[in-house]
Amino acid sequence: MHAAVVRQFDRPPGRHVYDPEKVELPSWLTYWVGCDWGYRHDSSVLWGRFDGEKVYVVKEFVKSGLDSRELSQTIVEVTRRLQGVDEKSRAKPKLDAIYLSHDCFSKIDGPRSRADEMGDELKRGGLPWPIRAKKERVDGLSLIRTMLNNGTLQISAACPRLIDGMKKALVNVDRPEDMEKIDGDDSVDSLRYLLASNPRLARTPVEVEVERVTKPLRDQGDYLSAMIAQKRVEDKHRVGDSTFSLGRFIKRRAGSSPRERGTIGTVTR
């Protein structure tokens, strides 16, 4: 009998699935995408956001029969809707990165790959050129399990195909650390691509951080300390670039601060 690949998923119920109507993420958090392309089988696209502690999978798109350009146009349109960008305006939607399944980078069918075709359309819509996603299935599944155990992965209830795929994913009996290849596993593959990347921690707007730090002091009538705290926040934002460790999902570094712990690699802004 096949066992579940991610038996940790949503145990207890509600641990890994959130209601988007009740959880409001800060508006300044950026988006990135993981995409598993398919034509006969489904293409699966997931949109993620990262708040410094958890990755939130906020949107999914799953459909078969779309060519490279049609899928790219859909990614642009869905990103526009997510970000409230009017199609008639000059404003462009924004994504930090688009991680695309490795098979799309093959040029077997001609001088240009599917990734090239998608890149043209994505760039036309104001989005970045796709990046080859990490191929290692076992490493990706291990990362998913680790994040589920740590509570650092949250999936919106608005992603029913991904939720169903997580529940149905089965262990490969010939390779127990891997997943059995079955119909409907496209969403889990796109989740691997989404997570096995380096989500960027967006900087909290200075005015938001100032309010968070100074309000308790002002409420106590300690205006001098509030002024000092405000200056520290403003000075920190003037410094510019910061480096954040993205290691908490895999291994916590000794001595690292809470703001430095949180994802999968190291990102410098």
Image (spheres, rainbow, N blue to C red):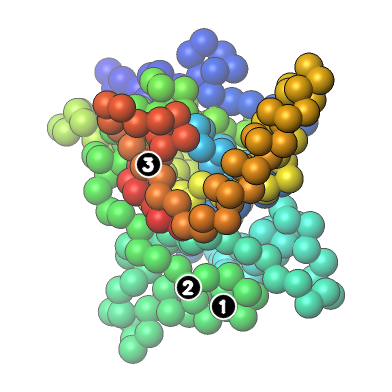
Q: Which dot, 3 or 2, sits closer to the camera?
A: 3
3 or 1: tag closer to the N-terminus: 1
Label 2 to label 1: alpha-carbon separation: 6 Å
Q: Which residue is mark 3?
A: 246
User: Which numbered dot is residue 123?
Assistant: 1
Q: Which dot, 3 or 1, sits closer to the camera?
A: 3
Mark 1: give few (<14), some (14-19) or many (20+) Cα within 10 Å: some
Q: Nearer the viewer, residue 234 or 113?
A: 234
Pointer 3 with pointer 1, Cβ within 8 A:
no
Q: Is residue 147 above or below residue 200?
A: above
Q: Which residue is mark 2?
A: 129
Pointer 2 with pointer 1, Cβ within 8 A:
yes
Please, what is the three-letter code of the amino acid marked with disc 2?
Answer: Trp
Residue displayed at 63% across by 48% down: 234
Q: Is residue 113 visible?
A: yes
3 or 2: tag closer to the N-terminus: 2
Looking at the rendering, in which quadrant would you find the N terminus? top left
Question: Where's residue 175, x and y in %?
Answer: 16, 33
Q: Secondary structure at mark 3?
A: loop
